[in-house]
Amino acid sequence: MKKLLFLGNNCHVDELIKYAKARGVYTIVTDNLTVEQSPVKAMADEAWDISVFDYDVLVEKCKEENVTAVLCGSSEVCIKANKELCERLNLPFYANEKAWNITNDKILFKQACIECGLPVPKDYDLDINFNAEDLANIEYPVVVKPTDCCSSLGLHICNNEQELIEGYKDAYEKSKVKKVVVEEFVAGEQIGIIYAFLNGQSHFIASGDDCACKHDASRRVFGCSPTKHKDIFEKRLEKQIEKLFNLLEIKAGTAGIQVITDGEKAAVLEMNYRLPGGKFPGEEILCTAMLDNALGEDSGISPERQKGQFASYALWLKPGKIAEIKGLDEFKAQPQKYSVQQFRQVGDVIEDETGMRQVLGYIMAFTDPKHADEFIKSVNDNIQVISETGEDLLCRYRFEKGYAV
């Protein structure tokens, strides 16, 4: 019997376990959390209380237990551990070295996009010395971000020189390789384009639009699927994205391309070579692609583009320690109407300026965009996240003229 070790309690692990069990695979989950903190442990056939970073112990345990595959969900941290363990155990890992290196470096990825004819934001030359001539050449607003961070960590939208210098210093500190991108800020909606790779071939699976906070464009709040910018994708991006996959020699796994557009101009921002950070109705094909590679199997599944519509709401939190969460269970109790993905728990400390780590979770409503306002109001009226001091930490948004306000 094949044994599959899952790393951590991150998005999609629950679905991966379900589909792995349906194949007759023995499933194991490991992390250093309790079952209450890591509920996927209760879903698996076996659970280990070993940190995903304790590589030496995990390697020996995997050898003792005859583990035949290692996999995780969408966590960037767990993916790095996944790669390390697969290399040490000589097990399949979906990403080749070329694709891994380029997609994890924003500068290299942008160069690859240009080579394939994909539109990208304009770059500006700037380093930590803040040369006066370089600063004088910059046209505001600009985006500053580390080349090697995720979850919006170190990302700043700067409207003047003072904001640029402060934002650059923060991005520089957060970058392990001390490399920072400064590029033009392209206003508009963000399109997410999701692919699965089966038997060496790429398949377009789904698309959707993200809506940002009007006063903080790095904060994505609302989403809907499919994208309303279908023409831009089909006429200006689809063939070039296929060229990019060929350049990166991608044959397995899943990927998400992030594009920003104002309805006319479009620019590719980055690529996440992993499962998407949130759930959506068509995730079976993505989980299948990951399992096929890890297990060395061909499921024979026919890749289909996502059907149906949905709207999503990212529940952003203000800083504080969570003492109580009210109302979320009411949405969890209606799986026919909503899908709830929860990241943060009672007892967690929410720190300011930590990107996606300030998100309690996502609520997805299986509805069309016409009814999105009703969904948003229901969330705002019924969910509270109470801090130790009695403050409600939930940031409530409404949709207004293309923005979350």
Image: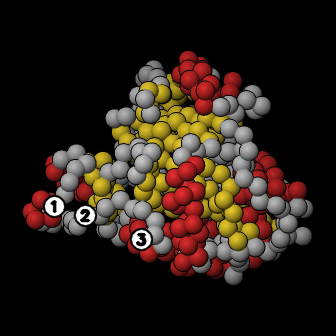
Query: Dot 2 lies on which element?
Result: loop
Q: Quadrant of residue 269?
A: bottom left
Q: CA distance from mark 3 to mark 1?
A: 22 Å
Residue type at tag 2:
Tyr
Query: Dot 3 lies on which element?
Result: helix
Does the CB distance between marks 2 and 3 fall below 8 Å? Answer: no
Q: Nearer the viewer, mark 2 or mark 3?
A: 3
Categorize mark 1 by other alpha carbons within 10 Å: few (<14), some (14-19), many (20+). few
- Which residue is tagged 3? 114
Instruction: Point out the tag, 2 or 1, that comes first from the N-terminus.
Output: 2
Does the CB distance between marks 3 and 1 fall below 8 Å? Answer: no
- Which residue is tagged 1? 137
Residue at (73, 29) in percent of width and height: 337
At which x and y percent is residue 125? Answer: 23, 67
- Which residue is tagged 2? 124
Q: Is residue 282 left or right of residue 18?
A: left
Q: Return the residue nearer the eye: 187 or 48.
A: 187
**Quick check: can you spot residue 249?**
yes
Instruction: Point out the tag, 2 or 3, that comes first from the N-terminus.
Output: 3
Q: Which corner quadrant holds the N terminus?
A: bottom right
Residue at (30, 55) in percent of width and height: 184
Does the CB distance between marks 2 and 1 fall below 8 Å? Answer: yes
Q: CA distance from mark 2 to mark 3?
A: 15 Å
Residue type at tag 3:
Ile
Residue type at tag 1:
Asn
Whether 38 is drawn above or below 99: the answer is above
Q: CA distance from mark 2 to mark 1?
A: 8 Å
Whether 12 is drawn above or below 126: the answer is above
Q: Is residue 222 left or right of residue 365?
A: left
Q: Return the residue nearer the eye: 347 or 377.
A: 377
Dot label at residue 18: none
